[in-house]
Amino acid sequence: MKRPVRLEPGQKLVLTANRLLDGRTVWWGADGTWDLHIGRAALLDANDAEAALSRAVEQAQHDGVVGVYDAAVKAVTPPEPVTVREKIRAYGPTVHPEFAVETEQ
Amino acid sequence: MSLPVGHYQYDRIDRDFLQARIAEFEGQVNRRLDGTLSEDEFKPLRLMNGLYLQLHAYMLRVAIPYGILDSRQLRKLGEIARRYDRDYGHFTTRQNIQFNWIRLEDTPAILRELAEVDMHAIQTSGNCIRNVTADEYAGAAADELVDPRVHAEILRQWSTLHPEFTFLPRKFKIAISGSPNDRVAARFHDIGILARPGEDGAPVFRIFVGGGLGRTPIIGEELFDSVREEHLLATLEAIVRVYNAHGRRDNIYKARIKILVQAIGVEAYREAVEAELAQMDLERYRLTPEAVAAIRSRFAVPLLEAPSDADAVLAEQRRADPIFDRWVRSNTHVHRDPGHIIATISLKPAGGIPGDATSAQIGRLADLADAYSFGEIRITHLQNVVLGHVRKDRLRDLWLGLAEVGLAEANIGLIGDIVACPGLDYCALANARSIPIAQKLGARFADTALQAEIGALRINISGCINACGHHHAGHIGLLGVDKRGEEFFQLTVGGRAENGAAIGMILGAALPEDETVDAIARLVDCYLGRREGGETFLDTLTRLGHEPFREAAYETV
Amino acid sequence: MKLFELGERTAQVHDVLVTVAELADRDDARAVLLESADDPALVKPYLNRLELVVLRFPIFRDGRGFTQARELREYLRFSGEIRAEGHILPDQAAFLRRCGVDSVVLPKNGNGDPALWEKQLRQFPVAYQRSVLPEWSVGPGLRVEEAS
């Protein structure tokens, strides 16, 4: 499902997936590990993202993740996803603030 | 152990089968973890056992065959919510329950716990014959001709791991009712079945085929008027066989049976089914009276006894308490026994999440079912709960018990009784969130007196074109769409799923999320201002046409 | 090519395997390959000489082969060998067998482990609907097991 990446100024790409064992949303960090917090995601340029993505897809079974893809974020701290869908994946369902990813342990 | 009221009682053979299914699934999970099964291979296999991967976690959809549970099963669902999920469950429009925060590695253990109470997640998803739905008032309603649940159970068994029909072009949904008043949306199903008494005592079945909502809403057409009981399974085999052989497999959006029926016409479909039947060994597929009787004997029938003044007691309590009276007016239905009444418990509190119930509420519902309705609970396709056999003189006690856990909302069939899919807060397919707009609408129309004044008006909300919230069938329907990352809602009016099924008509361009609630309020005001006599929203819409409503919705002040 | 037998019948290797279209011109052919879109009724004129019908699954999710097998057994009374090949999974072993398939060409990856296929064939003690196999009732109701 490769689509052309068109990033607006100030945007970067992050890699995301779900963990195979528990399904939780995870983000790919610069050290090659997957983390629940988008704040630890590596911010990538379009060119770097392509290589990182294909490597992450190859490694998915080994890393225990499913459905790896890239998503655009505003390059702020922590990065802020561009679409509603990725915001919800990053922070949790909007209808249950008590389940917000940043507040749970 | 005594038989449960309202559903089939498993025996050792059925329980061994469930254990075998769990062992099979556990093997599949292990092969996924060790890489023998790719995700592309595992996904259809896990879906066939009700396990989705959503935005935040796995979701497990547990089957509630024909919507009927006993209290021990409901209690178990509450325990699972507490132990393996986040203390709540979500009842769906297919009379099932889903848990939103499930771990793949816990799933075999959860399935074992479910099996302790004869429950499972078999065929709650996947391209197979799904959980069969039935009339939520089955066996209780005064207007019923045939209790459809014995045949719903027969269909559940027949479709379970069917060797030929487990890899169909697309999902396949069957609903069955035995009432002249369609409460199962029979004509919005792949197969809709209406049972009525036949001349020899056995029921006969009117069969609709090729209905559905989704991306291409179509009202099902009558395939056969009178199928005899002995030929019910043969007929269904033939219908599904034609679909399996000829349904499209090149495009999942055109793969449902409705597309095939539309492409060749219902006459050609009927001819194809009859050609199959002519070649089949009908004796082999015959549903014998003995088999029906054997399955029927595994259902308990409630012993309905009420004091002779039960009706008078209820009437007096209603006179004395207008708040109770309002709840009785909206949330009950006539029972076939004059001393009893059917109570619908709303899972639509104003501002709440439609269809959600906490573990505590689930546990309380089980207790109340034991105390007031033979331990039997029904889940409705409108995401509510029904206690089917409540003694009239004890109805108020039930209501008081419900109020203690926030379940006494008096809004069944009213504007607050909103049907909504989980939407983008959970679902990987959604384009927009469904729950927040449902909550805002619920809050806007929270006043129960206002709801009673508005009268019968159903709002259905879907977060994407797959239409799990049945927006096409809503008197007012909302479809969430994504416009450049923003949530918009397209409005339809005039849909209905009951008798005289109709698909809602689109009013105009989709509205931004923050303007949608106001637009619906203006639609309602338009109706209130222009209705005549005792007209419902649909009556006024039919009389005036869409134009005044379109103008009201898009009026900018 | 490794074959796995789902039942009693011994799988036979045929050197000549033709398509349905080729059957008319190949009097020597005893084995035919059906694609999932092919109508099994097309082989009807050749049933007397056919010993093997191979059903090719383009992907395991394409379930037309199950209906093809049943039509061959139930409508055409084909008594020769039916084989499934292509993308099939051991999870489908019992379904294939109950629809009339005798043998499979084992997948070349981990899903081709014969132990997985054996295990799946024995997974379920009963079924809830009739198949093409000889069966008898188990307990009251619809349940059957294979007659042995």
Image: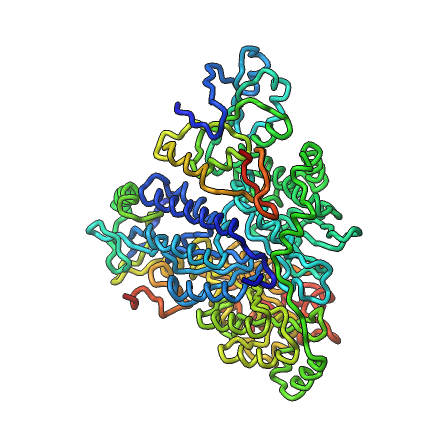
Can you say whether C55 is above or below C47 in the image? Answer: below
In percent of the image, x 70 and y 64: which residue is there? Answer: B545
Residue extending furthest toward the left: A31
State the quadrant of the C terminus of chain A. bottom left
State the quadrant of the N terminus of chain A. top left
Q: Position of residue C57 (x, y in %)?
A: 48, 31
Q: Position of residue B53 (x, y in %)?
A: 40, 52
Residue extending furthest toward the bottom: B320
Left or right: A45 in relation to B370: left
Which quarter of the picture shows residue A9?
bottom left
In percent of the image, x 44 and y 32: which residue is there? Answer: C87
Left or right: B228 in relation to C147: right
Residue extending furthest toward the right: B199
User: Could you say which is closer to the camera, residue B223 or residue B69?
Assistant: B69
Can you say whether B156 is above or below C74 in the image? Answer: below
Camera sees residue B262 = no
Which quarter of the picture shows residue B459?
bottom right
User: Could you say which is closer to the camera, residue B210 or residue A40?
Assistant: B210
Q: How is the image coloured?
A: rainbow
Camera sees residue A38 = yes
User: Could you say which is closer to the camera, residue B504 or residue A99?
Assistant: A99
User: Could you say which is closer to the camera, residue B45 or residue B115?
Assistant: B115
Q: Position of residue B301 (x, y in %)?
A: 64, 63
Q: Position of residue B183 (x, y in %)?
A: 66, 61
Q: How many marks?
A: 0
